Image: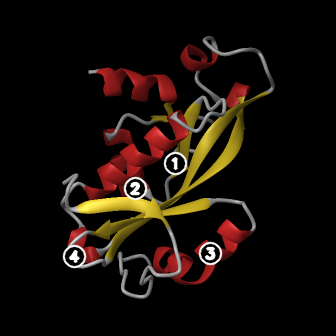
Amino acid sequence: MTGRFRIEVLAPEHDRASLECGSAALDRYLRQQATQDMRRNTSVCYVAVDVQTEVVAGYYTLAASSVPLTDLAESVAKKLPRYPVVPVARVGRLAVGHSFQGQQLGAALLWDAGLRAMRSGMGVFALLVDAKDEAAAAFYLHHGFIPFGIQPLHLVLPIATLVKRTRA
């Protein structure tokens, strides 16, 4: 897996039109809005590129965000300072092209997002996602995310969990 794809910041030379993941909204975002969001500094889009074909196989976006401390489970919140909100890195979108699904690329993209958040040099408590549906939530739950807040599709993965997995 690691040698087949490289993950890098979206650039003009990437062919965004060829990615089809099964979600029109996610396909449209990459084609029409990702570069605008990057220009506005509201998120960064990272693409997984097949090293042999140079095809964009998938992508994710990462942005700074925060969550109310009171929305976190008490077992998580009790380990944090008593600030009203805590900083997180938000994975806004994550998509894998049809022809690359089932190859663990989604997990690799998620892992890359976690590593970038961990190494950002900013205080970031966790990765946060708002899963688009139950299937997406199952993917994130499988990778260690836990629910927070009152919405069942709001999920968080503490950076401390990533650190433990990195050292294992």
Residue lying at the far right of the rendered structure:
84
Residue lying at the far top of the rendered structure:
78
User: Which residue is denoted by mark 2 in the rendering?
Assistant: 136
> How far apart, in angstroms, are the residues tagged by discs 1 and 2?
9 Å
Q: Which of pointers 4 and 3 indicates the residue nearer the eye? A: 3
Residue at x 40% of width, y 55% of height: 136
Q: Earlier in the sequence, mark 2 or mark 3?
A: 3
Q: Secondary structure at mark 1?
A: loop
User: Which residue is denoted by mark 3 in the rendering?
Assistant: 35
Q: 55 left or right of 62? A: left
Q: Return the residue nearer the eye: 17 or 84.
A: 17
User: Which residue is denoted by mark 1 in the rendering?
Assistant: 153
Q: Secondary structure at mark 2?
A: helix
Q: Is residue 153 above or below residue 75?
A: below
Q: Which mark is residue 99?
A: 4
Q: Secondary structure at mark 4?
A: helix
Image coordinates of residue 85 in percent, x first then y, are 76, 30
Mark 3: few, some, or many residues within 10 Å (few <14, many ≥20)? some
In this rendering, the count of numbered labels is: 4
> How far apart, in angstroms, are the residues tagged by discs 4 and 3?
24 Å
Mark 1: few, some, or many residues within 10 Å (few <14, many ≥20)? many
Q: Secondary structure at mark 3?
A: helix
